[in-house]
Amino acid sequence: MRKPLFRAFLTVLLLLTLALTGCSRQAEEEKKDDALLLGFSQLGSESGWRIGNTKSVQEAAEAAGIRLMLENANQSQEKQLTALRSFIAYRVDVIAFSPIVQEGWDNVLREAREAGIPVIIEDRTVDTKDESLYAVHVGSDFYSEGVMAGEYLLKKLSTLPPETVLNVVELTGTQGSSPMLLRSAGFRDTVAKEPRVHILDSISGDFMISKGKECVRLMLEKYGTEFDVLFSHNDAMMYGALDAFGEYGVIPGRDVIIISVDGEQQAIDLLKEGKVNCVVECTPMLGEAIMQIARDLKDGKPVEREVYSSERAFTEFDDLSQLAPRGY
Ligand code: GYE
């Protein structure tokens, strides 16, 4: 008599369990669909900095439960424009992108605004007359980075004999990009007051190792021992430059003063070895800030218009023994 009753009880229990797990699975799916969708257009993979930046965005999205549509434009503005338009067509909740150059974004930004999609400019900046075309810029103060590079050089000069004249070769990043324009301006404005610092030449290595090497070879051919200082707009080009110096028997850090920007672990190691004299920090770890801003924008909360990372310079005059691993 008891058995059929017990069986009925078991069947009800089983059905209830199935219904409940079904419900929670459905809820999970809905939650996933509900998650903020962020379209992120990365400009390329030209440096360790850039690879660290992409990783930071991917990891932060994952940790924040944000769905990420990531497109890498491989150094092409055309491809970035296509990626941005595909995000608009897809109706993502928020767009973030690092503009390869400053100019040429107004039309696509207008299209995003018409579609009601807020835009976060990360890392590099855009040049636009209509500031309402994007919501936030989050990244570094590139002008200050140039100033820090110049200040280091002035300090170095003060340790050298008074008759010293320093001839600088500037190895710039991608032409028309905001870090290239602003690092250059900050550096020049800072050294302009010192007549013993002279800018010999300026050449673009496009932020890449291979081009940095080629450019420095050219400069060594052209100027030989007149070349006293290298100001490289990023670490990657500086690595290439060190290869070129090696080929010409020039000892970096001693025969030529080396200044670089980014602060990758490899550059800090070279600084500690005395092959580099100054590395200005520029952090690629922008992922968490982007996710927070994206959430606030989706929830209609107020956001700060300009979010700068706090940065410093690492130089041969500093004690770097306690410096934490850079993570990029
Ligand atoms: O310095 C360089 C990268 O836009 C700040 O781009 C960034 C620069 C960075 O390729 O390494």
Image (cartoon, grey):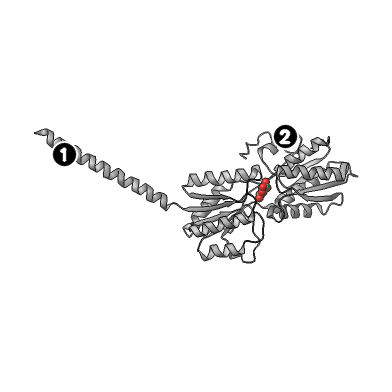
> Which residue: 8% across, 33% down?
1
Q: Which of marks 1 and 2 is in front?
A: 1
> Which residue: 19% across, 39% down?
11
Find residue 266 and report its horizontal and vertical position in percent.
Answer: 68, 37
> Which residue: 64% across, 59% down?
126
Label 2 belongs to which residue?
A: 272
Residue 306, can we see it? no
Query: Is label 1 within 8 A of ligand 1 (CB to nearest ligand atom)?
Result: no
Local SS, label 1: helix
Task: Kindly identify the amino acid type of the residue bearing the numbered disc 2.
Answer: Lys
Residue furthest to the left: 1
Vertical position of residue 159 compared to residue 106: above or below: above
Quadrant of the frame with the C terminus: top right
Answer whether labels 1 and 2 touch (C-beta < 8 Å). Answer: no
Local SS, label 2: helix
Is 279 in front, or is 117? 117
Residue 151, can we see it? yes
State left or right for residue 157 relative to residue 93.
right
Task: Kindly identify the amino acid type of the residue bearing the numbered disc 1.
Answer: Ala
Is 88 in front, or is 168? 88
Find residue 164 and report its horizontal and vertical position in percent.
Answer: 88, 44
Label 1 belongs to which residue?
A: 8
Find residue 297 and report its horizontal and vertical position in percent.
Answer: 50, 58
> Which residue: 78% across, 53% down?
188
Vertical position of residue 119 compared to residue 65: above or below: below
Quadrant hosting residue 219:
top right
